[in-house]
Amino acid sequence: MAEAHQAVAFQFTVTPDGVDFRLSREALKHIYLSGINSWKKRLIRIKNGILRGVYPGSPTSWLVVVMATVGSSYCKVDISMGLVCYIQRCLPKGCGPYRTPHTRALLSMAIFSTGVWMMGIFFFRQTLKLLLSYHGWMFEMHGQTSHFTKVWAYLESVRPLLDDEEYYRMETLAKEFQDKTAPRLQKYLVLKSWWATNYVSDWWEEYVYLRSRAPLVVNSNYYVMDFVLINNTNIQAARLGNVVHAMIMYRRKLDREEIKPVMALGIVPMCSYQMERMFNTTRIPGKESDLLQHLSDSRHVAVYHKGRFFKVWLYEGSRLLKPCDLEMQFQRILDDPSPPQPGEEKLAALTAGGRVEWAQARQAFFSSGKNKAALDAIERAAFFVALDEESHHYDPDDEASLSLYGKALLHGNCYNRWFDKSFTVIAFKNGQLGLNTEHAWADAPIIGHLWEFVLGTDTFHLGYTETGHCLGKPNPMLAAPQRLQWDIPEQCRAVIESAYRVATALADDVELYCFQFLPFGKGLIKKCRTSPDAFVQIALQLAHFRDRGKFCLTYEASMTRMFREGRTETVRSCTSESTAFVQAMVEGSHMKADLQDLFRKASKKHQNMYRLAMTGAGIDRHLFCLYLVSKYLGVSSPFLAEVLSEPWRLSTSQIAQFQIRMFDPDQYPNHLGAGGGFGPVADDGYGVSYMIAGENTIFFHISSKFSSSETNAQRFGKHIRQALLDIADLFQVSKADS
């Protein structure tokens, strides 16, 4: 989603310190640190796996192996082939617990059984790893992709955007890079791949997200919408009570590792690593690089209402508060008449401004005393909650309502969201909800998984009374929410105002156009014998050409979670095949059969590129890592410099849905979320997210900047509508047919 913004023209400084054999201490140091972090995480997972009984290494399976060994011994059958006797001879004699032969025999059998059990786990996991590493099922033909092939794939992706002279220049740079620079850089990546769990993800997190000094609001954070066609209750505190309770239920399942992995195409499980930092996580600002602070547990949430901050406990002793108790606590905050303290109202604007300014202010004004205690309460919270004073909802008869709802979620008033928290739950006055999510810790499908669970649990499991309140009777003896105390000096208030002005300028410049496309959805698209994603992506190319009169570099995010700790890869959707189709459509002189053939070729190309990206054969993350290595080595590469500086003037993302089957969408067709969106990536470009919401509708979220005379989100939205209809008309498929 918004990751494309940081992936363009990022800068960092490395001083290479060369040693013998043309190795760089700086490069090796970062590879070494990546490996150390990977092994730390592996050891933690091994420990958690043993303690929580993760298949196949559960205590029960260990007990079965021990019983089998002991049982066979009593039956005079030595399944250890003499190993138990050998272990028994090696045990110290005549002291402690090893004194009797019977004890020594039992201990020897336990040691042997533990060894067999651990070897079984190892071989089982390695076999499973080999099986899951096979991605050929996604292709008719599939093979390894070398860096030579990836350089060629890059050239193919930019061919529709360059004239012959520009393409020849780029081809020359690529050839020089392939022959001279790439082999040396590649050796470091191979070394890292041997040592670290994932050769991309830690560098991607650090350099694309955490080292970015730009404000998070609009540039990085993204939003997620509520169910938009139903309303469970109009009572703000009640809705929040159910939802916060459901979120902690999800966290408990996550901690116990009871959440089933999402399956790619229903066949292969995808890595769930990103879920580990969903809760109790905050992005801490730094002068050069931010830090993701993750705690093992948190027993409270931080709440903002009318310029005041509160701490709300989620537990009474060891018992999770019931939804009705949480409703009572949130209602107490809503009823609290106390005014904000001096400087408190706009304090969260610090998280919306520049990262360097926020880091300096945090060190100067929040490193001791009551300010540090209050800030700790926010940063150490499970997540952040914003109780808004305005109402938002989607009215199908008022299309602008969806866009206003999206704008409120994307940036609010720039000081009523804590943009550093892993996510902020936003509750509007009419009970409508939404999320604002920080991007560094995970990608959109992860928060989408949580949100599907929460909305399904809220609607189908927790429920409300006839008057719209949470079920049950609250405990009035619970201690009231704790008001956070601040002592904010004048100098700090000036920094807050400065950050607020920066954030407001960004927010006011965003044009957001959200709409529901009603003529058709996934059901009709399938009748065109193409994938829904390819259909929409080709429609976006047609719409963009009609809007701007030219093609542009297009970014579509694809998951790489079939690999451990995988995040995303780029699908370059503007291909020679899609541009040929668009040009033929615009010319208007081609036969329908020819247009259909061109469309199918473009669709087939897009689907193949998407599969390549999912299976690790994309090009952009590899080139990104080669660029980093070149910086560490102090090697100049004009080819890589140009690749990494290209602007993505059309950044797109499909929003995942129905990752959890909490309910039957055919039985409850109105229980639809509208997806979410993000800010524009380029100053003169568009950000587009879309959710193919079931069989009969698609939601679009389009962003651009008012300051650009070349873009207009509403105009582009109209072109998208028409492009979808025109392509459907090629196949003479109407909504009635679907």
Image (tube, rainbow, N blue to C red):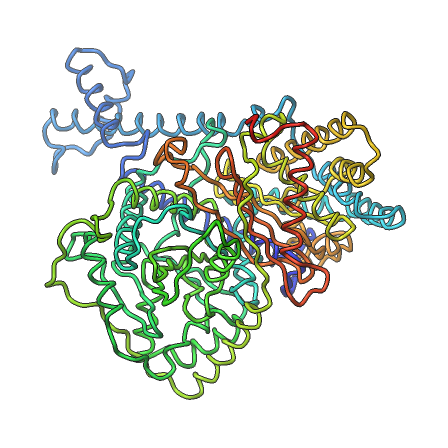
Give percent across and percent down for residue 311. 26, 67
Dividing the picture into quarters, in which one does residue 148 lie? Answer: top right
Q: How many marks?
A: 0
Image coordinates for residue 305, horizontal then vertical, percent: 33, 69
Residue drawn where x is 73% and y is 51% of the image: 547
Which residue is depicted at the point 59% across and 53% down?
Answer: 702
Please identify the quadrant where the C terminus is shown.
top right
| Extreme residue in the front direction | 397
Task: Report x, y in % for residue 121.
Answer: 35, 29
In this rendered view, identify the residue nearer to me: 294 or 352: 352
Q: Residue at x 60, y 33 (%)?
A: 611
Q: Which residue is at the front of the view, 102 or 448? A: 448
Farthest residue, direction bottom: 490
Residue 607, horizontal then vertical, whole percent = 64, 32
Q: Does residue 524 appear to the left or right of 435 in the view shown? A: right
- Seen in the picture, residue 308 relative to 674 is either above or below; the reply is below
